[in-house]
Amino acid sequence: MKLSAEQIKQLFDFTKKHYVEHYDVQVELVDHLANAIEDQWKENPNILFEDALQTEFKKFGIFGFTGLVEQKQVALQNHYWRLIKKELIDFFSIPKIIFSAVLFYILFQIFANPNEWMVANDYVILIGVVAITVAVFVYQKVSFKTLKKWLIQNTANYLYTLPISLLIYFRFGFTTSTLNPSLFKVLFSTTSSTLYILFLIVLYSKIIPLVKNEIIQTEKRFQFV
């Protein structure tokens, strides 16, 4: 026995009802459920479709499909974090270490010798950096739209928010609150700013384009499904 087109549609509706909003995951689950139901029918053709579906759904545990979606999301995020770490490490190997060293030196001189305007407007500078970061986030999010929702888009949204999250985490590293900062403050600000700038370079030159290409490829894979 094979599932009918109407039953396949019911499986898609079932996944949506159980909070699976990403089309690629829906297709994967529908394929799994359809095969499992047909396997049950091979053993007992008299099993009702709804009963077979509920039997298979119970195997996903008390959290249903939510646990599976979360596992896939975490796996994707970890994958891109590994890529980010690899690209960042490359900035501390020849020849990119020269750029990193020059950037560190320039920022060290800025934070070690702040002028009165920088001190008086330290939070204005920080707010300006935050505003630019948020503007880039909004642009990235609205400039790349797709017809369907894909799981990797969640990862893209997560990556878009990382610069904002890091700004909040290292917020004291981007300000100069005194004309005579301590060496610790200078080193902390310089290191934080250097790593942040390198992170942005990696994120927007390597990772975001890679994610966008993956979304395009995902759309192509599922365009006839």
Image: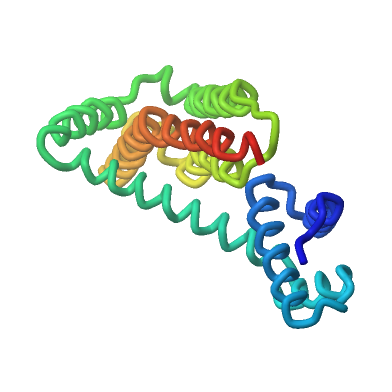
Horizontal and vertical percent position of residue 160: 54, 36
- Residue 97: x and y in percent read 15, 36
Question: In the displayed structure, would residue 95 be above or below residue 144?
Answer: below
Quarter residue 224 falls in = top right
Q: Is residue 82 left or right of residue 51?
A: left
Residue 131 percent across, percent down from the top left: 57, 24
- Res 104 → quadrant: top left
- Foreground: 77 or 104? 77
Residue at the far bottom in the pictured view? 43
Left or right of residue 104, residue 5 in this image: right
Q: Is residue 122 left or right of residue 198?
A: right
Q: Is residue 21 visible?
A: yes
- Name the spot of residue 30 as percent of width and height, x first: 71, 57
Residue 177 shows up from this direction: no
> How many numbered tags mark residues here?
0
Please report the residue visible at 62 percent of the width from the left and 60 percent of the height from the top.
70
Q: Residue at x 21, y 33 (%)?
A: 100
Image height of 71 relative to 157, above or below: below
Image point (56%, 44%), residue name:
152
Name the foreground residue: 133 vs 59. 59
Q: Locate the C terminus by quadrant.
A: top right
Point out the image quarter for the N terminus. Answer: bottom right
Q: Depth check: 175 or 60 in front?
A: 60
For residue 93, above or below residue 175: below
Q: Nearer the viewer, residue 181 or 46?
A: 46
